[in-house]
Image: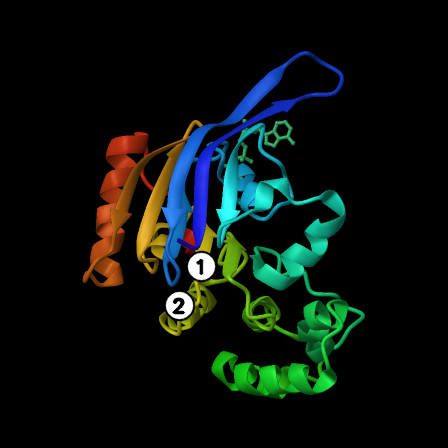
Amino acid sequence: MLLEVKHLKKVFKTRFSKEETTALVDIDFSVEEGEYIAIMGESGSGKTTLLNILSTLERPTQGQVLLNGEEITAIKENQLSSFRRDHLGFVFQEFNLLDTLSVRDNIYLPLVLSKQAPELMKTRLDALAPKLAISELLDKQPFELSGGQKQRVAVARALISQPDLVLADEPTAALDFKNSENLLELFEEINKSGQTIIMVTHSTLAASHAKRVLFIKDGVLYHQLYRGEKNSQAFAKEITLSMTSFLGTSAQGEQHA
Ligand SMILES: Nc1ncnc2c1ncn2[C@@H]1O[C@H](COP(=O)(O)OP(=O)(O)OP(=O)(O)O)[C@@H](O)[C@H]1O
């Protein structure tokens, strides 16, 4: 099993008050290599907290996360950044590219930080750039790119270290419909080539491209759907029905996928 999430609980305590918020009550699931999972839930349901724990940015109050059998929730503070660099790839809503670096250097950054040889960086980028349609963009600066182009560069940066797991936080939220569709197709292709992906999203459309959707409510995983052989339109309908019946609301986010 690639990822095992065992009985995660997260309680936030505010420093100056006695108030506590239980963001995650008891979250338990596992992920096989090659899966593509979307995590959905209403605002405040605990999605970001869960993703932050999987990213090792946040520690759980109770429970464990194992990646390839290694307990990542127990990694020492001073080893966390190198762990993240070597094993995880991140794609964020706001791209998080550094404007002072060229596109190429942005993509190389995780490998520069882990002191990889320049030849290896070039070989990896030469293989990735055509797949992501960014070959023409490598010498530009991020501020010269459109949102869709920036997100493809961010995906290249996430993939260049050949991570065990790509974690994406609302990756289509800042994109228009067409660029969202392009990014979701790209994620599907990347997944087909073997990359495991976990994506948090409000968007039914985005989730409908995944192979499995986990629904979280009030810090509990209470439902999941498998796509199976369905196309994304049929799966989107099923997700909407689940959202409506289980969450008591209709799915959000259709305006920008
Ligand atoms: N650092 C923190 N300190 C205190 N409470 C927090 C903190 N982070 C999150 N929470 C609380 O934990 C609960 C879950 O928040 P979380 O951000 O995980 O939800 P979410 O599903 O990602 O929401 P959204 O979709 O709006 O991003 C909320 O009640 C939130 O207020």
- Name the N-terminal-most of marks 1 and 2: 2
Extreme right residue here?
100
| Number of callouts | 2
Which residue is painted at 64% across and 56% down in the image? 84
| Secondary structure of residue under mark 1 | strand
Q: Classify residue 162 by image quadrant.
A: bottom right
4 or 151: nearer the viewer: 4
User: x and y percent of residue 190 in the render?
Assistant: 43, 71
Rendered residue at 71%/81% (across/down): 140
Is 250 placed left or right of 58 in the picture?
Answer: left
Task: Say if residue 169 shows up in the picture.
Answer: yes
Label 1 C-beta lies within 8 Å of the nearest ligand 1 atom: no
Q: Which residue is mark 1?
A: 197
Query: Residue 217: horizontal and vertical position, in percent?
Result: 39, 31
Tell me: residue 51, above or below residue 62.
Answer: below
Residue 166, percent from left and from top: 51, 60
- Local packing at callout 1 (Cα closer than 10 Å; few below 14, some 14-19, many 20+) is many
Q: CA distance from mark 1 to mark 2?
A: 7 Å
Q: Residue at x 55, y 68 (%)?
A: 155
Give the amino acid at mark 1. Ile
**Nearer-the-camera pick, 247 or 85:** 85
Q: Which residue carries the number 2 mark?
A: 191
Q: Which mark is residue 252?
A: none
The reply to whether residue 142 is visible in this rendering is no
Q: Are marks 1 and 2 in contact (CB under 8 Å)?
A: yes
**Residue in the picture at 43% in, 61% down:** 196
Image quadrant for the C terminus? bottom left
